């Protein structure tokens, strides 16, 4: 069965455009998945008390047969391949990939919450979802 997941891409270290392109390519190469739409890229200020530069953000719609857990594991591998280092919570990063929505699923696990709990607080995610035609 095919599911529709919305994945947020963000980067604020190094060549930010490169990392977003890297993420799009890696998402396109995921097994049993395909990118069906991409939002525009926009720059936003970091949402953190940790001093850091602005982010480039984008949302992609991903049709997938992967479960939410399998998808999260794949996203972590892509982040690792992009050189992401997890040292400071909400700190700067080469690449951040978040499952914002997955069909109409509600998941509540210690390391996986869908819809993403920050969705109501990130107006750019809401704009990007609207651009992709996501239904509320």
Image (tube, rainbow, N blue to C red):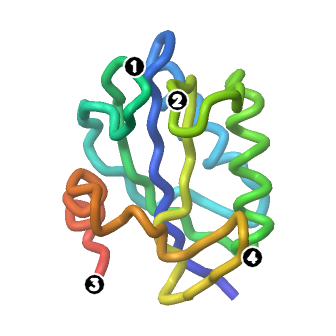
Residue in the image at 76% along x and 32% along y: 80
Residue beneath disc 2: 91
Dot 3 or dot 1, earlier in sequence = 1
Mark nearer the viewer, 4 or 2: 2
Residue beneath disc 3: 136
Residue beneath disc 1: 52
From the viewer's perspective, tell me whether residue 122 is left or right of residue 6.
left
Residue in the image at 44% along x and 54% along y: 60
Is mark 3 in CB contact (under 8 Å) with mark 1? no
Dot 2 or dot 3, earlier in sequence = 2
- Residue 82: x and y in percent read 68, 25
Quarter that holds the N terminus = bottom right
Dot 2 or dot 1, earlier in sequence = 1
Is residue 106 placed above or below 131 in the rendered structure?
A: below
Q: Quadrant of residue 81?
A: top right
Classify 10 Å Cα crowding around label 3: few (below 14), some (14-19), many (20 and above): few
Residue beneath disc 4: 67
- Residue 134: x and y in percent read 31, 75
From the viewer's perspective, tell me whether residue 115 is left or right of residue 53.
right
Classify 10 Å Cα crowding around label 4: few (below 14), some (14-19), many (20 and above): few
Quarter that holds the C terminus = bottom left
Is mark 2 in CB contact (under 8 Å) with mark 1? yes
Dot 4 or dot 2, earlier in sequence = 4
Inter-mark Cα distance, 2 to 3: 30 Å
Residue in the image at 28% along x and 61% along y: 121
Residue in the image at 29% along x and 68% along y: 120
- Residue 108: x and y in percent read 64, 81
Inter-mark Cα distance, 4 to 2: 28 Å
Is mark 2 in CB contact (under 8 Å) with mark 3? no
Mark nearer the viewer, 2 or 3: 2
Mark nearer the viewer, 3 or 1: 1
């Amino acid at each position: 069965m095919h599911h529709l997941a919305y994945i947020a891409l963000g980067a604020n270290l190094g060549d930010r455009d490169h990392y977003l392109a890297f993420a799009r390519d890696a998402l396109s190469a995921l097994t049993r998945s395909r990118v069906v739409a991409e939002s525009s890229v926009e720059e936003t200020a970091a949402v953190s008390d940790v001093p850091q530069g602005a982010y480039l953000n984008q949302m992609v719609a991903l049709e997938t047969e992967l479960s939410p857990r399998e998808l999260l594991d794949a996203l972590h591998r892509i982040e690792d391949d992009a050189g992401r280092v997890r040292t400071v919570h909400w700190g700067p990063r080469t690449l951040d990939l978040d499952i914002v929505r997955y069909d109409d699923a509600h998941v509540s696990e210690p390391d996986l919450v869908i819809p993403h709990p920050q969705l109501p607080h990130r107006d750019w995610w809401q704009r990007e979802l609207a651009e992709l035609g996501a239904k509320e």
